[in-house]
Image (cartoon, rainbow, N blue to C red):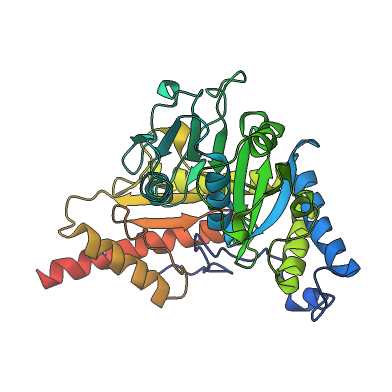
């Protein structure tokens, strides 16, 4: 016998892992002061870009001697820029436990053609970080957006390392604490945790990374859009609001409004608390049911933003078909949008719990998942 349809619906059914839900107070009218039609090189444009950089630094607690820049092409552009500029000076180790990390492996091995050591883990796991050679340059994602796992902390990364750490933190920044002293390059995009608009990336460099840029020239040509140095010196303007290509001032204003909202909910501590509360609601739900489970096998490595779930009921005959049917049913009811697992990941659901998502909406969604599960089990039995 199937359960009754829940009476309460999420106020906001958007649980996509990117682009992510806008912050709860979002209103298009708040963007009315965007300097549209003005040059980003004009005083007003540079002021808004500098404000975005400095407010990012302030909320995230980025050290004063780190450079923070706005670069083109989202997190992808930022991480590619880092790899193309910095890698090749010493041996490289690539760590991958999901599709985006695997993409960085492909670029380093097949495009840059570096003889890199590649260490991988299946979806739901991360690699043994204690076995990593941190005297190499090490590239990794902090949070596996498509696999629901994350680095638990930075303790395993030695302070006295010879190599650089290059961290793709696009679904971690503003939702998880990042150990800046252990990260030499950090990248993320606006459209993830704070729900900003797409196409802009953030590139954060430690003094060690800047030193590498100014002392090492890679053997391959760098496209203009990737260049961070000129005549052996860092192009400081990139980290002062002088972007490499033309940014969208509307997107800049949207990001500034999201940062203002972030400060209103307690800054970084408040953002992390909101994220943790939503993730915990899902974890508690799964722990009291025997038909659904977290894809992450180790509790310490569970993602708090991109929570990936798998169906475990032995009555399910077609895992992929069943998971897609549940996601489709939730979407058709208008209670959970864009929640299917990533195409390369194991079948299941992926629920975004980043800081712009209200925990009350996650709590309202969970009974609907149970209802949709029961509906599909019943439908499967009838078709059999």
Front-lying residue, 141 or 380: 141
- Of the 4 image quadrants, the one containing the C terminus is bottom left
- Of the 4 image quadrants, the one containing the N terminus is bottom left
Query: Which quadrant of the structure image shows residue 62?
Result: top right
Q: Residue at left 55%, top 49%?
A: 79
Front-lying residue, 326 or 213: 213
Q: Point out the residue furthest to the top here.
A: 160
Whether 181 is drawn above or below 221: the answer is above
- In the image, residue 234 lies at what x, y percent? 73, 44
- In the image, residue 360 lies at what x, y percent? 59, 58
Whether 257 is drawn above or below 304: the answer is below
Left/right of residue 86 with respect to residue 207 in the rendered view: left
- In the image, residue 368 lies at what x, y percent? 42, 64
Q: Residue at left 67%, top 44%?
A: 204
Whether residue 176 appears in this view of the structure is no
Query: Which quadrant of the structure image shows residue 132?
Result: top left
Q: How many numbered discs sit on the rendered protein?
A: 0
Q: Point out the residue furthest to the right here.
A: 43
Whether 37 is drawn above or below 93: the answer is below
Q: Point out the residue furthest to the bottom here.
A: 37
Left/right of residue 256 with respect to residue 353 in the rendered view: right
Front-lying residue, 209 or 314: 209
Left/right of residue 369 with respect to residue 279 in the rendered view: left
Whether residue 89 appears in this view of the structure is yes
């Amino acid at each position: 016998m199937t359960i009754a349809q829940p009476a309460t619906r999420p106020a906001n059914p958007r649980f996509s892992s990117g682009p992510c839900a806008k912050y709860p107070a979002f209103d298009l009218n708040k963007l009315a002061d965007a300097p549209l039609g003005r040059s980003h090189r004009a005083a007003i444009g540079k002021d808004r870009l500098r404000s975005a950089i400095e407010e990012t630094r302030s909320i995230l607690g980025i050290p004063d001697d780190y450079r923070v820049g706005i670069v083109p092409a989202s997190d992808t552009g930022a991480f590619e820029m880092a790899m193309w500029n910095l890698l090749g000076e010493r041996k490289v180790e690539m760590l991958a436990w999901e599709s985006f990390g695997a993409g960085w492996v492909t670029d380093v091995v097949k495009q840059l053609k570096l003889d890199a050591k590649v260490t991988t883990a299946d979806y739901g796991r991360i690699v043994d970080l204690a076995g990593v050679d941190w005297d190499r340059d090490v590239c990794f994602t902090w949070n596996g957006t498509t696999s629901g796992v994350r680095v638990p902390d930075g303790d395993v990364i030695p302070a006295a390392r010879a190599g650089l750490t290059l961290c793709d933190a696009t679904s971690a920044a503003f939702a998880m604490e990042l150990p800046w002293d252990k990260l030499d390059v950090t990248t993320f995009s606006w459209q993830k945790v704070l729900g900003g608009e797409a196409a802009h990336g953030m590139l954060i460099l430690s003094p060690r990374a800047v030193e590498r840029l100014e002392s090492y020239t890679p053997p391959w040509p760098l496209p203009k859009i990737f260049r961070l140095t000129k005549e052996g010196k860092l192009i400081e303007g990139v980290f002062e609001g002088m972007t490499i290509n033309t940014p969208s001032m509307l997107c800049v204003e949207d990001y500034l409004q999201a940062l203002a909202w972030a400060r209103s909910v307690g800054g970084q501590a408040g953002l992390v608390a909101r994220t943790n509360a939503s993730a915990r609601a899902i974890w508690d739900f799964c722990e009291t049911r025997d038909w659904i489970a977290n894809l992450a096998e180790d509790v310490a490595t569970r993602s708090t933003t991109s929570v990936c779930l798998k169906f475990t009921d032995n009555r399910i005959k077609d895992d992929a078909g069943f998971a897609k049917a549940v996601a489709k049913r939730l979407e058709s009811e208008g209670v959970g949008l864009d929640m299917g697992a990533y195409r390369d990941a194991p079948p299941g659901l992926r629920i975004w719990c980043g800081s712009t998502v209200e925990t009350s909406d996650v709590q309202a969604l969970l009974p609907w998942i149970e209802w949709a599960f029961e509906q599909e089990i019943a439908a499967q039995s009838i078709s059999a």
